[in-house]
Image: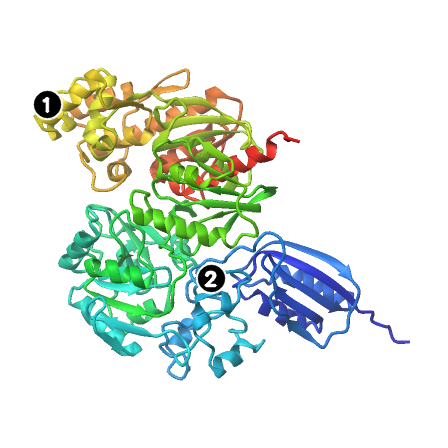
Amino acid sequence: MSRVLVAHRRRSIVTGVVQGVGFRPFVYRIATELGLTGLVGNDSSSVFLEVQGPPEALDEFARRLVAEAPPLARIADVRTEEIPPAPDEGFRIAESRGGGGARTPIPPDIAVCADCVRELFEPADRRYRHPFITCTNCGPRFTIIRGLPYDRPATTMAGFPLCPRCAAEYGDPADRRFHAQPVACPDCGPVLWFEATPGGARVTGTDAALAAAQRALADGRVVAIKGIGGYHLACAADSEDAAAALRERKRRGDKPFAVMARDLEVARRLAGIDAAEESVLISPARPVVLLARLDGAPVVDGVAPGSPWLGVMLPYSPLHHLLFDGPEAPEVLVLTSANRSDEPICFTDEDAAARLPALAGAVLNHDRPIHVPCDDSVVRVVDGRELPIRRSRGYAPLPVELGRSVPSVLAVGGELKNTFCLTEDRRAFCSAHIGDMGTLETLTAFERSVAQLTGMQSTGPERLAADLHPAYQTRRWAERNAGELPLDLVQHHHAHVVSLLAEHGRLDEPIVGVAFDGTGYGTDGAIWGGEILLLDAASAPFTRAGHLAPVALAGGDVAVRNPWRMALSHLSSAGIGWTADLPPVAAATPAELRLLRSQMDTGAGCVPCTSMGRLFDAVASLLGIRHRIGYEGQAAIELEVAAASASGWPRFRFAVDGGVLDPAPVLAGIVAGMRAGMSRAVLAAAFHEAVAEAVAEVATAVSGIRLAGLTGGVFQNVLLLRLCRERLRAEGFEVLTHRVVPPNDGGLALGQAVVSALRARNAPSQE
């Protein structure tokens, strides 16, 4: 007697990054392969699906749903229930619907995939040399989405109706472009053109526009290129004149530019690349990776003046691949965001018309609108793992999973390297990089991005969070816009430590948090930045268990821009005279020395400062490495470079008393070493070693906790990061470092949001 197969039906809700990544076509394929009937669709919070068939096939479907998910998908949860069978005619993709709970995460922009690149250069393919080729596995997402659920009408591609052939691919479950929302072709998609001057006469046609852009670059011109998340400025990397012109237009000082290499082979001629760095370079995120520059690299000194590192990225859009193709094509281009320093990236037609004439000599443009701007991401690779420096394209706005449901909080971040963060349900959504909040343009960009991301939430924020600093533009914005919402002010370094706990999913654990940076407003009104904090958990208040001994910060931002000032302040605190043989004394004019002495004697314009970042600046000046900076962190970066070349050094030690780290003995040792003829490199390395030993000494003494975290912008210094981690591990600590958000202020908003959300969750009921 034959066995009767009884059909069962299961309904599942799949949450995570499951829209815009080919998830519905994937579900369709495995369901039809297994002979199941049912449906799959999007709502604003998830992918919903129903499958019907024999139990064995349903079990296999459930296994493959997770094990074979599309490469860009990130499944957070699958909730499944049995429901009564229903009559079906095969398996179908249902229309998207509203409703649901918390909104689904918006996927980031992804580099063009290998299949699309292959078609891009295949003469027989109908998308041959189409600058906007894409499929379900690649292309723009975050920068084109206007709303959820993620369907074409809710993107900036809504203005490009599908031609019959694209519509057929879009509706064919066997096609790679099945339900690919940005899909288009030369017959129905965006078009490319070249302007010999911004806003001037156009050269139309893809090949003609590309050839004109390549000639302009070869002639040493600065060319603006409209990309996925905004306009870039490009120039030849082998032309000193072009690099100088670009630097002048951007008002960039000495800050290095990033470069884009044609392919991995060319990148290997620029920098040393190990297996882990290669993996990040070719990853779907395609960030800028900071690499060790090779001697003889085919880029001029003006690209990265005095730096042993190069920020290198590979092509990530079809347009980039086409720009590097052809007899006049470059192998390496300088590629930097189209803006003046500290301003947001240019991304709209109106903005381009206003700003590009001062920035570029020509424009390679197109008519696909960008809904939200997104800069390139920047990372370093440390011991095989990414250390984010700027988290933006390819990563934002992927959420951090918090492991618990929390109130909806909008945290507005800090003043520099601004990002903001939104919590909803169990997730924290971190924005793309906004910039430094010193201009009206950046504030406008901040407000636009906040509106875009909050507009995709199921509800508005229930509270706001901001930094404690009373002069931060972000705090002032939060105070103006809070209305009836509670506003939580979160101490700067507390937020840094909690951001580290959040990204590691360790919110309930006690930690010794080492938060070293340049500037953070302390609870006592002083400038903090060399802090060792104890937290019983992320939800608990912090204890300031240790800190750098305070010195006078004379002149505020003037001292930041002039490390010689910090050197002389530290020398005064250490009881070391300002003798003429010391480099910071020699670097200052007599008038500058008199003014600084007067400020320190009277206290005029001085505030107490415990900043480790400023101590690094001071040591860089004391060693004669850098007395005046052209960009943030320059002195500390060059100090790290010097230290990395040393082999063998003397041992210096901070004086540690009650958790206070006094650098006076270290400074005295450096001065004595200089006078004895020791090299800068040796003394710079000895300083790094002394900081690491002091960190381990204080962390061990203050508590029995054996979880430590290293956070704050100073820990972008890979040498210091490794030394501190090594010393702490030797003392029995497990050490957390950043892997998801930057250690600098780009990660601050995540910590603010979590502190605020946990305060609200733990507050006693008012009923």
Q: Picture quarter containing residue 55?
A: bottom right
Label 1: state its secondary structure.
loop
Label 2: state its secondary structure.
loop
- Asked if residue 315 is positioned above or below residue 164 in the image, the reply reads above
The C terminus: image quadrant: top right
- Of all residues, the one furthest to the front in this rendering is 483
Task: Categorize mark 2 by other alpha carbons within 10 Å: few (<14), some (14-19), many (20+).
Answer: many
**Observer-nearest residue: 383 or 509?**
509
How has the structure been colored for display?
A: rainbow
Residue 397 visible in this rendered orientation of the protein:
no
The N terminus: image quadrant: bottom right
The image position of residue 675, as x and y in percent, is 15, 23
Q: What residue is shown at x 20% (from left), y 27% (from top)?
A: 565
Residue 488 visible in this rendered orientation of the protein:
yes
Disc 2 to disc 1, C-alpha distance = 61 Å
The image position of residue 712, as x and y in percent, is 39, 36
The image position of residue 44, as x and y in percent, is 58, 59
**Observer-nearest residue: 511 or 250?**
250
- Name the amino acid type tagged 2: Ile
Q: Which residue is mark 2?
A: 145
Q: Which residue is mark 1?
A: 580
